[in-house]
Image (cartoon, rainbow, N blue to C red):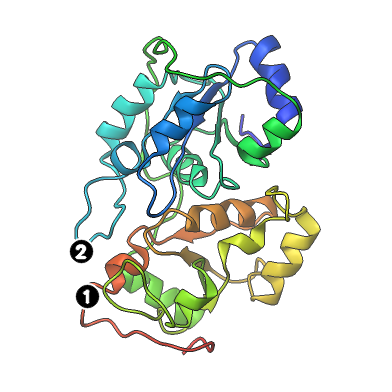
Amino acid sequence: MSEPVLTTPAELYSRLFHGDPAPVVLDVRWRLGDPHGHDHYLAGHLPGAVYVDLDTELAAPPTPERGRHPLPDPAALQRAARRWGLGPGRPVVVYDDNGNTAAARAWWLLRWAGVERVSLLDGALAAWRAAGLPVEVGEPAPPAEGDVVLAAGQLPVLDADAAAEVARTGVLLDARAAERYRGETEPVDPRAGHIPGALSAPTGDNLAPDGTFHGVEELARRFTALGADGTTEVGVYCGSGVTAAHTVAALARVGITAALYPGSWSAWSSDTTRPAAVGAAAG
């Protein structure tokens, strides 16, 4: 049984205290340039939430060829998921403190690995707090070891050649901020610009001002305007395959399956044989 992409704070609260089984809740605090995710977690998290380190548990070590956040080895991901308490068929809810732009990486990875019952907490921690629901501080006792069995490859992925092909024949969305797409700035990767043919689709535009996802109709209008209307192949990339997962989730909300390019711009721009386009046009 697959879960909806999103769950609300009220729904999650009810499931936490009355669900059978209660969902595993994963806290994925991560922001580019902020190494203090665990400290933020200790200062306040959902009851029973398990902290997940994006850099070490949701990614393999970085390489120029594979980017800043390569997909983790499936066996390593399974070991981590068992530490988090995941078991067969048990639902999972993930969140962060930034509109789920980091938590979407866990959502995508778990679905890629065959966990169907995983959802994002719509509005993330801010929505939970706004609803007046309880938070815990400090380090909780570790959960009981789970026995989930993961099977990688359940969602589509792209390598660099495939991403270039989607940009030519389908719709390739660049989920980074527009100024990075245009090549006006590049804070972390070797070169500025974007994959030729890709369209600018900043992750932040998936969200309403309160950090919740826009409704299905508004998301559908957004993606249709970009050519992602369900009639052609769609791929998504970002800087390192993290926030692109958020756009994959937004597309899933409107019934469109999109492929993720895990290496994203960090891998593409490290390969000097790959062209880089600049400016507002797709190139």
- Can residue 170 be seen in the rendering of this structure? no
Where 32 sits versus 221, above or below?
above
Residue nearest the viewer, comparing 266 with 126: 126
Question: Is the N terminus in the top left, top right, bottom left or bottom right quadrant?
Answer: top right
Q: Residues within 10 Å of mark 1 (few under 14, many from 20)?
A: some
Where 141 sits versus 84, above or below?
above
Q: Position of residue 276 (x, y in %)?
A: 35, 84
Instruction: Tell me: 208 left or right of 84.
Output: right
Q: Element at badge 1?
A: loop
Q: Which residue is mark 2?
A: 65
Q: Which mark is residue 271?
A: 1
- Taking the spot 56% from the left edge, 18% from the top edge, the residue there is 136
Q: CA distance from mark 2 to mark 1?
A: 7 Å
At label 1, the amino acid type is: Asp
Where 173 sits versus 135, above or below?
below
At label 2, the amino acid type is: Glu
Instruction: Tell me: 90 left or right of 126.
Output: left
- Taking the spot 37% from the left edge, 54% from the top edge, the residue there is 33
Q: Position of residue 230 (x, y in %)?
A: 65, 66
Q: Element at badge 2?
A: loop
Question: Dividing the picture into quarters, in which one does residue 22 lie?
Answer: top right
Does the CB distance between marks 2 and 1 fall below 8 Å?
yes
Where 61 sits versus 145, above or below?
below
Q: Position of residue 117 (x, y in %)?
A: 57, 30
- Taking the spot 74% from the left edge, 26% from the top edge, the residue there is 11
- Taking the spot 44% from the left edge, 83% from the top edge, the residue there is 184
Question: Dividing the picture into quarters, in which one does residue 164 lie?
Answer: bottom left
